[in-house]
């Protein structure tokens, strides 16, 4: 028997037979709908008092007959996968409107989201007779990148979707009288597909993962909601750029409350779907952490790839991690993030894997995936504990040597690595990107009178750092736990510098590092006006203002370091000199530093000593 889809509850036997007979109709490719199909849909709507639609394949067959309610038609799942690049679904929707209404937003969203060939609405008279027909089809549009800000309850420009007709990714025709539709449907669709294919071949895509729309949703009842939302969206844009995402557009919405299922709310999400079609965007990135159910619901509603803020940061860390412990930490965080989402299963996960010694239902593929993920998590946690112990041993050896340690901390992209390079002459990677460096780097800084200090660069902080990532990288921050002094670097040119200071201090408190003495360093002085720099120092009298790219501006910081570390050097003067051995031409420092020694300076005796040859023993300090 033919299958009816949608709202089939309460249909009479006569109505059911009327609907089933629609499957017998054939529609030539040259026409949108034959008079016979239009009449059959009108009769079924009049009999049921509901909208009735048919999804017509280009072969002429009726693939689906769908029943709605008086004002809406809910289409069946015709496949989550998108059509091929530049191609449509090869299905057109012809359905009835009982109250002579035009194409609705739902009709147009279905057209764009499902990449249907065409959507046509047959408008009926009160007596159930077909009067006019209106139809719409997708068109290629070259939309401009822009920030769309919407406040819930605000009026739009009157067209019902907040955008000008010229920017829309579809074109509407009609309504026209049913018998006067003069269009060659087959030729129209062929021309459109050729145009879409041509566009997809010529369009250059900068990012490997395609284009994305960034979405921020905030509650407007909070004080300063709009300003905070704009700053958060700006930071998300920087994160996306660091991850290699081509940002096509950004959407900001203020609501009375966050929608518990779709976050944005259905109407606004439909607008985002239309905007994604305009800009050929394939991904939505939300500036918040989505629950597994929210991510699944949004993906199902939009047919787009959905990412949240945590996934974006995890992707950046996965790209940037270089050391073995950094890669382990990222993998652990990714697994902990993924575990709760393994519950999003499909029918393929119901296969059984029993056997000898395992009679009965056995484990499903889902359970096997969870078990293996948990086993991997336990293994990674063990590996990280071992590496943490090794770091602790290195710190103890370093403490015995008596060399003071200064750790550079601060918000990401504040210029910490650049400052390390300028102070020590190192060549650590420094880029104008968030999380350009993830692995701890230590370098030696020499002061007059043979006084030295080890300066350590740490991973940058960020607001709402994902908890799994924070837990995984907690061991990395242990390097700062034994520091004698912290340099808290702040981007003076960033409008959100006060919030960055608060975020860094809150994370230092959570890491039990807030009690360590620290110097506040305002970086990027060359990017602000002199008056603004003076105001900063008035508010923070003990701070230092400098430009990490200009060594001359660091003199005040070096003087403060020497003053703060004076007592520490005096204590170190009583510590015996450290011995290292050259073995097979390699400098063996007993695991003092985390990394390979780059150079050695012999302290004494000044002549007749050499660091060359197997078994030579020298007293020295080491640049790492």
Image (tube, rainbow, N blue to C red):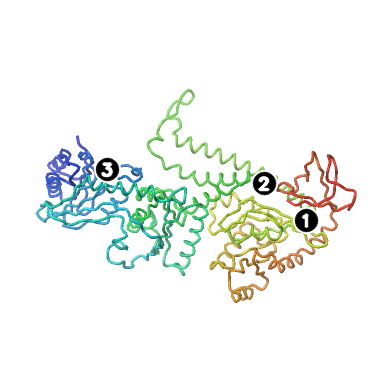
The front one of 166 and 265 is 166
> In front of the other: label 2 or label 3?
3
Residue drawn at x 13%, y 49% is: 42
How many discs appear? 3
Secondary structure type for disc 2: helix
Q: Pinpoint residue 537: horizontal percent, then vertical percent.
A: 64, 73
Q: Residues within 10 Å of mark 2 (few under 14, many from 20)?
A: some
Distance CA(mark 2)–CA(mark 3): 58 Å
Left of 129 or right of it: where is 195? right
Q: Residues within 10 Å of mark 1 (few under 14, many from 20)?
A: many
Q: Which mark is residue 388?
A: 2
Q: Is residue 369 above or below residue 261?
A: above
Secondary structure type for disc 3: loop
Q: Earlier in the sequence, mark 1 or mark 2?
A: 2
Q: Which mark is residue 256?
A: none
Q: Earlier in the sequence, mark 2 or mark 3?
A: 3
Left of 522 or right of it: where is 444? right
Instruction: Provide the residue designation for mark 1.
Output: 403
Which picture quadrant has residue 134?
bottom left
Position of the N terminus by quadrant: top left
Distance CA(mark 1)–CA(mark 2): 21 Å
Left of 231 or right of it: where is 95? left
Instruction: Provide the residue designation for mark 3.
Output: 90
């Amino acid at each position: 028997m033919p299958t009816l889809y949608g709202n089939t509850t309460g249909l009479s036997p006569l109505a059911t037979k009327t609907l089933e007979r629609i499957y017998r109709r054939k529609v030539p490719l040259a026409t949108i709908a034959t008079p016979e199909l239009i009449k059959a849909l009108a009769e079924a709507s009049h009999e049921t008092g509901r909208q009735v639609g048919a999804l017509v394949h280009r072969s002429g067959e009726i693939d689906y007959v769908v029943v709605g309610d008086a004002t809406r038609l809910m289409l069946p799942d015709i496949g989550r996968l998108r059509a091929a690049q530049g191609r449509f679904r090869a299905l057109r929707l012809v359905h009835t409107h009982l109250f002579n209404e035009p194409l609705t937003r739902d009709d147009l969203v279905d057209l764009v989201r499902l990449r249907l060939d065409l959507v046509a609405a047959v408008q009926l008279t009160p007596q159930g007779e077909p009067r006019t027909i209106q139809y719409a089809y997708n068109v290629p549009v070259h939309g401009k990148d822009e920030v769309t800000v919407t406040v819930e309850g605000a009026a739009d420009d009157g067209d019902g979707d907040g955008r000008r007709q010229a920017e829309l990714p579809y074109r509407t025709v009609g309504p026209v009288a049913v018998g006067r539709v003069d269009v060659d449907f087959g030729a129209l669709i062929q021309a459109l597909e050729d145009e879409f294919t041509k566009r997809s071949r010529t369009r250059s895509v900068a990012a490997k993962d395609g284009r994305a729309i960034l979405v921020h949703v905030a509650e407007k009842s909070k004080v300063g909601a709009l300003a905070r939302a704009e700053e958060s969206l700006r930071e998300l844009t920087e994160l996306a750029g660091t991850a290699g995402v081509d940002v096509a557009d950004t959407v900001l919405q203020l609501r009375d409350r966050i929608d518990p299922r779709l976050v944005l709310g259905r109407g606004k999400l439909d607008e985002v779907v239309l905007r994604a079609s305009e800009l050929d965007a394939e991904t939505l990135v939300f500036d918040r952490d989505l629950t597994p159910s929210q991510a699944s619901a949004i993906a199902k509603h939009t047919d787009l790839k959905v990412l949240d803020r945590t996934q974006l940061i995890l992707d950046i860390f996965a790209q940037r991690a270089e050391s073995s412990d950094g890669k382990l930490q990222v993998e652990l965080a990714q697994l902990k993030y993924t575990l709760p989402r393994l519950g999003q299963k499909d029918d393929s996960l119901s296969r059984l894997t029993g056997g000898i010694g395992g009679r009965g239902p056995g484990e499903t593929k889902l359970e096997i995936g969870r078990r293996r993920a948990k086993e991997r998590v336990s293994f990674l946690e063990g590996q990280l504990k071992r590496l943490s112990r090794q770091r602790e041993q290195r710190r103890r050896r370093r403490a015995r040597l008596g060399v003071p340690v200064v750790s550079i901390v601060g918000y990401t992209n504040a210029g910490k690595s650049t400052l390390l390079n300028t102070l020590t002459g190192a060549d650590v990677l420094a880029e104008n990107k968030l999380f350009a460096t993830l692995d701890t780097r230590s370098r030696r800084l020499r002061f007059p009178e043979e006084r030295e200090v080890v300066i350590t660069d740490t991973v940058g902080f960020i607001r709402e750092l994902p908890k799994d990532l924070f837990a995984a990288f907690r061991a990395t921050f242990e390097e700062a736990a034994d520091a004698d002094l912290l340099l808290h670097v702040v981007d003076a040119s960033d409008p959100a510098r006060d919030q960055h200071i608060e975020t860094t201090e809150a994370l230092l408190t959570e890491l039990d590092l807030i009690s360590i003495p620290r110097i506040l360093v305002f970086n990027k002085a060359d990017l602000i006006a002199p008056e603004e720099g003076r105001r900063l120092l008035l508010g923070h009298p003990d701070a230092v203002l400098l430009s990490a790219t200009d060594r001359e501006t660091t003199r005040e910081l070096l003087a403060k370091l020497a003053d703060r570390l004076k007592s520490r050097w005096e204590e170190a003067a009583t510590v015996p000199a450290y011995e290292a051995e050259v073995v097979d031409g390699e400098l063996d420092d007993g695991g003092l530093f985390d990394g390979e020694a780059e150079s050695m300076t012999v302290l004494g005796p000044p002549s007749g000593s050499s660091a060359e040859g197997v078994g030579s023993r020298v007293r020295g300090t080491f640049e790492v």
